[in-house]
Image (cartoon, helix red, strand yellow):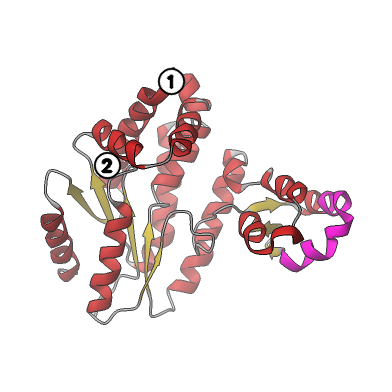
């Protein structure tokens, strides 16, 4: 019935991405579609990387030499793509337990894709999306992704590496051009008061979440360059990120719908359903 094969839900933490993504899946299923939902942090995400290590040939050889007793384990669980070796190290540690030593887990974690230099990280992510699109375009499935399209590039390239906003936009534009064959639809949950939204979600989530977010956004390149500190620095960053994402949406060649939290959820869902039905 519909031509689109990808729906992405974006917004800052606490904006309702998970709730909205699940609503989209339920709405599509009720109309006879076959949506597949991937939430933030899914180890099996088909287009993004989640807790995945990437090693080149020399790094993989060095790792094998470092852990000779795990050579068979590494060979069994490595995934070779192009000129690199990939390990879903957190998933393996969770599923296999003692078969994967803590020392090996920590060694692989040092090659986490989201911790790599910006240029290599971008290259790997773009290729990952290309591979996904080449498969998905032939499938009779609608994929629904919670974040990862805007959130992850802006958080990594801006907060971690402090790249110029034009460079971040060019990366997101490249992603947009890659997914165009899927006729994607992007839903953005805009917050009228980002600080209030963040304070609410801070109260709902564990202190460990707030501690990590505070370190990530204020203790790395962007936060240091802009003098961000504490929870106020977190709120400052997310306010800036939301403004950038909304600006990007106006320039990207994607069908997008911005839903405001000035409306209640019932109204937002009605707008969303009408948008889909108008495809």
Seen in the picture, residue 192 relative to 10 is either above or below; the reply is: above
- Residue 230: percent from left, percent from top: 42, 22
- The percent position of residue 138, horizontal first and vertical second, equals 44, 78
22 versus 50 height, above or below = below
Percent x, y of residue 36: 39, 71
Q: Is residue 71 magenta?
A: yes
Among the 4 quarters of the image, the one containing residue 49: bottom right
Q: Residue furthest top?
A: 227
Residue 246, disc: 2
Where disc 2 sits, the SS reads helix
- Report crowding for label 2: few under 14, some 14 to 19, many 20 or more residues within 10 A (C-alpha): some
Q: Residue at x 16, y 66 (%)?
A: 273
Q: x%, y% of residue 208?
A: 48, 37
- Read off the residue under disc 1: 229
Which element type, helix, strand or loop, lies under badge 1? loop
Start and end of the magenta stretch?
Answer: 61-77
* Residue 104 is a magenta residue: no
């Amino acid at each position: 019935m519909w031509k689109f094969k990808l729906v992405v839900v974006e917004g800052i933490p606490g904006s309702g991405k998970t709730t909205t993504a699940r609503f989209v899946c339920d709405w599509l299923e009720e109309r006879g579609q076959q949506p597949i939902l991937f939430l933030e942090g899914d180890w099996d995400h088909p287009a993004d990387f989640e807790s995945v290590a990437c090693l080149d040939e020399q790094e993989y050889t060095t790792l094998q030499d470092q852990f000779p007793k795990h050579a068979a384990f590494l060979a069994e669980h490595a995934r070779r793509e192009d000129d690199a070796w990939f390990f879903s190290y957190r998933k393996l540690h969770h599923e296999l337990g003692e078969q994967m030593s803590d020392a090996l887990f920590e060694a692989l974690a040092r090659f986490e894709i989201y911790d790599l230099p910006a240029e290599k990280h971008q290259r790997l992510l773009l290729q990952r999306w290309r591979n996904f699109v080449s498969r998905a375009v032939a499938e009779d499935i609608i994929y629904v992704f919670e974040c990862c399209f805007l959130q992850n590039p802006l958080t990594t390239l801006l907060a971690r590496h402090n790249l110029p906003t034009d460079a971040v936009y060019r990366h997101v534009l490249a992603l947009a051009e890659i997914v165009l064959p899927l006729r994607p639809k992007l839903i953005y949950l805009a917050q009228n008061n980002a600080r209030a939204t963040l304070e609410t979600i801070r109260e709902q989530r564990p202190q460990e979440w707030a501690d990590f977010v505070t370190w990530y956004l204020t203790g790395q390149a962007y936060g240091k360059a802009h003098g961000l500190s504490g929870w106020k620095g977190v709120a400052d960053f997310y306010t800036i990120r939301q403004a950038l994402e909304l600006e990007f949406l106006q320039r990207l060649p994607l069908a997008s719908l911005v839903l405001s939290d000035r409306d209640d959820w019932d109204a937002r869902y009605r707008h969303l359903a009408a948008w889909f039905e108008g495809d």
